[in-house]
Image (cartoon, rainbow, N blue to C red):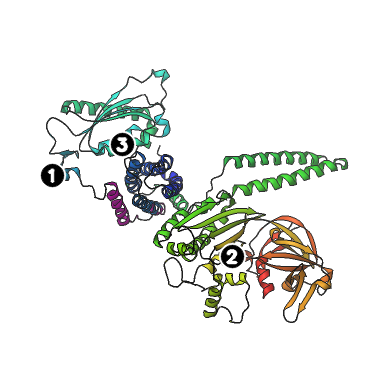
Amino acid sequence: MSIDMAQFHQVFFEESFEGLDVMETGLLNLDMGDVDDEEINTIFRAAHYIKGGSGTFGFTSVSDFTHVMETLLDEMRDGRRQVTQTAVDVLLGSVDCLREMLTAISDEQDVDEARVAEHKKTLEIELNGGEVKTDSATETGSEAVVSEAGTITDSSVNSDGEQGWHIAFSPHAHLLKTGNDPVRMFRELSHLGELTATVDFQGVPGFYDLDPEECHLSWDLKIAGDIPEAEIDDIFDWVEEECDLAIQPLSAKSTKAEQSAATQTVDESIQAKTEKTPLQAETAKPVPATENSKPKNDKNKEAAKSGAKGSSSIRVDTGKIDTLINMVGELVITQSMLSLVGEHFELNKLDQLKNGLSQLERHTRELQESVMNIRMLPISFVFSRFPRLVHDLSTKLDKKIELVLVGENTEVDKTVVELLSDPLVHLVRNSLDHGIEMPADRIAAGKPETGTITLEAYHRGGNIVIEVKDDGKGLNKDVLRAKAIEKGLIDEAAILTDKQTYELIFMAGFSTAEKLTDVSGRGVGMDVVRRNIQTLGGNIEIISELGKGSTIAIHLPLTLAILDGQSIAVGDERFIIPLGAIIESVNVNESMINRVAGKGETFRLRDEYIPIVRMHEIFGVKTAQALKLTDGLLVVVEGQGMRCGLFIDDLLGQQQVVIKSLEANYRKVEGVSGATILGDGSVALILDIPGLVRLSNQ
């Protein structure tokens, strides 16, 4: 029986990428010159997992590369090396290289060997104090000789001693249950030098007490050759918690006869072990040491490949699963009760039926909430990439910037998380490049030398709000206006509010950068940001104060699948208004209405004049209130910071609706974000409030 290891590759890749994120975050948090034991141990464990896992699956280039990283981290962990900015930068670059290697392997692409070699050389230079370590035989001027058996010997070894190691290896009884096998370790040792071993059977229990899944053997190993101790440690460090181990240098040569006898003994013990446990012997087959090795089964290969391209999996807290299971149990009980009522239904059971239907409605709603909750991920999945981004760009721009993350545990739908990353990158890069001033300019302005960028997430009603704040120079309205006029984006006579002036930066082709850089300044990006946010059903707004800084706030729905809405009637048609967009509904009288020739209608709500959007005209619906504003209702809604009043016939009720894409099933319609199927089977359009606000302004 053979086990196809390819089935475990995807899990390894997912956990390795998570480990790289942990390493990156930990490295950015390290204090220069000091060692935080917990932080450095966390980084070391992540590297150790990647090295061990890649070695197990035969990704030898990854394990070899990570081994050098691990050695450098180990010296920091033991206090033999101080944490320096240079070392941190080298390790951060190595994390990037490792991420590229794993991505290439998971996509079944060739690894960029030249780039790997370059980063590995940089690591070794840092590890050896600025010099590339040369072979020990070269350093001593001696000549290394490779024998016919493949054992490395050294002509400089004197006759009184032998280079090599004496290893006392006593596995704990449960070693085999953890998936480890001494046979594989012995095979790796034999690749390093001439291995001899003696097996100790004294710990083996009687036949009737023997558990074939437990290991009761121990070994006395000797390996000859010019072998660095680190390579010995590398083989055993995966089981260091699962065995008693002692490694000492060899002090005297053993006779050839003794070596031959010991070799025969270990061969016999391995053969006996293989015969007793055929499954372990089968799984101990060497894994091909190449990234390009293919699974034997084509079907498994395709599964592994498709999984590697992009994981659709999601990790769910067991508490959420328990809640879901409980809700399903309640639903089953209610269904059983209704079935009993329906078997012999009589009018005197009407109240019982109503109670059962009420329970069914409540359980269905709770079940829906539980299922939707499973898709919710903390926003930290997005925020975690920004410490590195700020670190790298602030270094490139010669600025001192501190990143503050607030509300990292705020949860949002997985789909929103995946689509939110790129817009936020644009916003943070702009804050770094345009917002935060150079240190000298900040000091001259009476500010601290170090600027601050804050990423904050929080819930507000049925939405999530994400704010990108900086304490930089803010937006200059005069400069924005002049640049927009220069580029022909607005008319010179145009009168703009502060809010409209700030939003000029979202116009395609707009940029205030004095020179082009690879960070920003090409007039692309911010218009894409707003378009992407609107695609997610959200909106974006800017608050800025010259000399004090800017805040860009993104408002997004918590989920893209379910919407809390208000059902409205316009003639014989029904529409859904997102509940979070509604400010209030009012009955108007003639004294509140103002009509401007050629410009439409407005009504005065307290001290604000709000444009009126006649829904029947927008969607071509016949209605009795077509000309009488006083006979209908005005629903005041807000989108992208602007308000308008929707003139409708009536409010019908609030309900949760499942959003269906109108663009995918029909085509894009201005002022409509989607559609839903109502309880009676009819279709109701879901209104796009920002789109309607734009229509009202036009």
Q: Which mark is residue 343?
A: none
Decide which of 453, 226 is in the foreground and name it: 453
Secondary element at image label 2 = strand
Whether residue 288 is visible to the viewer of this picture, yes or no, is no
Residue at horizontal 42 percent and vertical 18 percent from the top? 208
Q: Is residue 641 left or right of residue 116?
A: right
Q: Residues within 10 Å of mark 3 (few under 14, many from 20)?
A: few
Q: CA distance from mark 2 to mark 1?
A: 69 Å
Kindly report which numbered mark, 3 or 1, lies closer to the viewer in this rendering: 1
Mark closer to the chain start, 3 or 1 = 1
Secondary element at image label 1 = loop
Residue 53 position within the rendered picture, expressed as x and y whole percent measured from the top left: 39, 42
Q: Is residue 680 left or right of residue 379?
A: right
Name the residue type under label 1: Gly
Q: CA distance from mark 3 to mark 1?
A: 27 Å
The residue where tag 3 is placed is 233
Name the residue type under label 3: Asp
Q: Locate the N terminus and report the quarter of the image it occupies.
A: top left
Q: CA distance from mark 3 to mark 2?
A: 57 Å
Mark closer to the chain start, 2 or 1 = 1
Residue 74 position within the rendered picture, expressed as x and y whole percent measured from the top left: 34, 41
What is the span of residues highlighted in magenta in the rendered image?
A: 103-127
The residue where tag 1 is placed is 141
304 inside magenta stretch: no
Q: Are marks 3 and 2 in contact (CB under 8 Å)?
A: no
Task: Decide: is 54 above or below 247.
Answer: below
Residue 387 position within the rendered picture, expressed as x and y whole percent measured from the top left: 46, 54
Residue 532 position within the rendered picture, expressed as x and y whole percent measured from the top left: 56, 64
Residue at horizontal 19 percent and vertical 34 percent from the top? 163
